[in-house]
Image: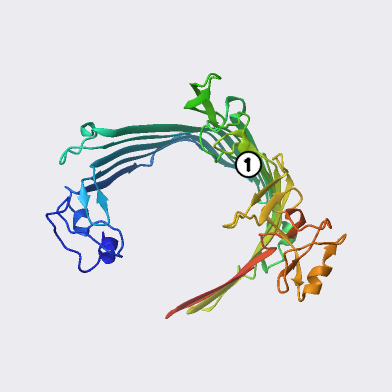
Amino acid sequence: MIGTILQSVPTLEKYDDTREGGYGGTYGDVVNIPHPLAIIDDNSMDRYNENVKIFANLYAQIELFKGLKYKLNLTPDFSFERYKNYLNKYDFGLATNSITQLTERQRRRRNILVENLLTFDRTFGEHKISALAGYTYQDSRFRHIQAYGEGLPQGLEEIDAATTNRSNEGNSWRSVLTSILGRVFYSYQNKYLFTATIRRDGSSKFGKNNRYGYFPSFSLGWNVAEEKFMENVHWLDQLKLRGGYGVLGNQEIDNYQYSSTITTGINYPDGNGGLLQGAFPKNFANPDIKWEETAMTNVGIDFMAFNNRLSLTADYYVKNTKDILLTVPIPISSGGANDPIRNAGKIRNNGFEFNLGWMDQPNPDISYGINLIGSFNKNKVIAMGSESGSIKGGSTNQNITTSETKAGYPIGGYWLISTAGYFNSQEEVDAYAKDGKKIQPAAEPGDIKFVDANNDGVINDDDRVFQGSPFPDFTFALNGNMRSKISTYQSDCKEC
């Protein structure tokens, strides 16, 4: 509304009984927009979008006996939307509508999460044990219904009153995720720590043969600072060594990707000059898609000293992802309207991350702190799942790609044709030849000289070479702060 008013010409007439709708109209070289007064007139334009959301978090807990508890979590989440857009006949000069139109839409969303958790937590002398067993169920549903019609009698805003171009549409989906999980934690003298977890997840986004995935993990920790041989190291507050291994699953794709969509109303020639109606699997599917899995191994250290003023947290990790859920391009000649989802390829990420800090309070009135956060990360494609062995990307407005993902290189690596300066004269253009033929026959002095990387005498996509990774080798951030009774100051510095 405000935007329409700002774009309207100051001389726009409020009313004009000679025009359809009764409002003034624009003319000449002006913006084609509705009349501002007509927008707020329900007889001319009646629009509304009503949304209702209901969210709750309910739980009940009971202690069965000492250390053993059962907890039920119930999280319902509902939303309801109703949309209406009615357009009467109008003539605003450049903007006109010669027939009444009505669109109505209703959408419902429902998400229910139920968690059944059984926990045990006890300490027996120098031994501490905690365990968890649970079953979770998440059910998400969506439904969409929309109707449209034209030629309604003026003043009657009902779809049934439409006399022409009536249409309707509707769709729905349902997604269910179930999990059975267990976790055990053990600690001895708060020195030696062990955690193990196992979960079995089932997702309706995969076919029956690949619906479930198993994802284990474990970790070990050693609080070195708690050992007796460290008792005389008074400046040390914490020294913990840790390591672990775990597998995570990913199911973040659209629903029903394992099942093909059939499109009706497709005409086929019968061989006698006529047409027969048929159906066609317009959207290709992959019934064999399954969980994407990421296995991660990491070792780390937690260190604090000098009355907790100096701190260091450092981790080295190796993360291998396989069966990546990826949209893999297929030839246009296949006739499909989409590229199917596949479990394509393997990727490895490894690196080192750290957080080094110093925090101090020289007196009760002043405190300060400084942190250096950094990471060294490397990304590499181990194997590709597409038939072509690569996936191109980074298209320009001329549909020229600038990046490519292929085995042995990082994701989205830059593959470009190298240059060797400029042609300074016509003699240089003529001399740049292979077997007596110019490599760049259309070049002129001042044009860029491209490198014939494969030495075939032609500059084309075959001359692209790897030019670098889109991911930085090292990133860091330096944060500082100072506080006093009268002021607070904070600064940040980030660099790659």
The residue lying furthest to the left in this view is 17
The residue lying furthest to the front in this view is 273
Where's residue 114, x and y in %?
44, 34
- Which quadrant holds the N terminus? bottom left
Work out whether residue 260 or residue 442 is closer to the camera in this orientation and state it. Answer: 442
Where's residue 82, x and y in %?
29, 41
Work out whether residue 35 or residue 442 is closer to the camera in this orientation and state it. Answer: 442
Where's residue 359, x and y in %?
58, 72
- Which quadrant holds the C terminus? bottom right
Work out whether residue 87 or residue 343 is closer to the camera in this orientation and state it. Answer: 87
**Which residue does the numbered mark 1 point to in the structure image?**
329
In the image, is 284 to the left or to the right of 107? right
How would you rate the neighbour count of disc 1 (Cα within 10 Å): few for under 14, some for 14-19, many for 20 or more? some
In the image, is 235 to the left or to the right of 269? right
* Helix, strand or loop under label 1: loop
Q: Is residue 425 above or below residue 348?
A: below
Where's residue 255, x and y in %?
51, 34
Q: Residue at x 16, y 41 (%)?
A: 154
Residue 436 location, quadrant? bottom right
Looking at the rendered structure, the kind of residue marked 1 is Pro
The answer to whether any part of residue 53 appears in the image is yes
The answer to whether any part of residue 198 appears in the image is no
Q: Is residue 175 above or below residue 475?
A: above
Q: Residue at x 54, y 28 (%)?
A: 281
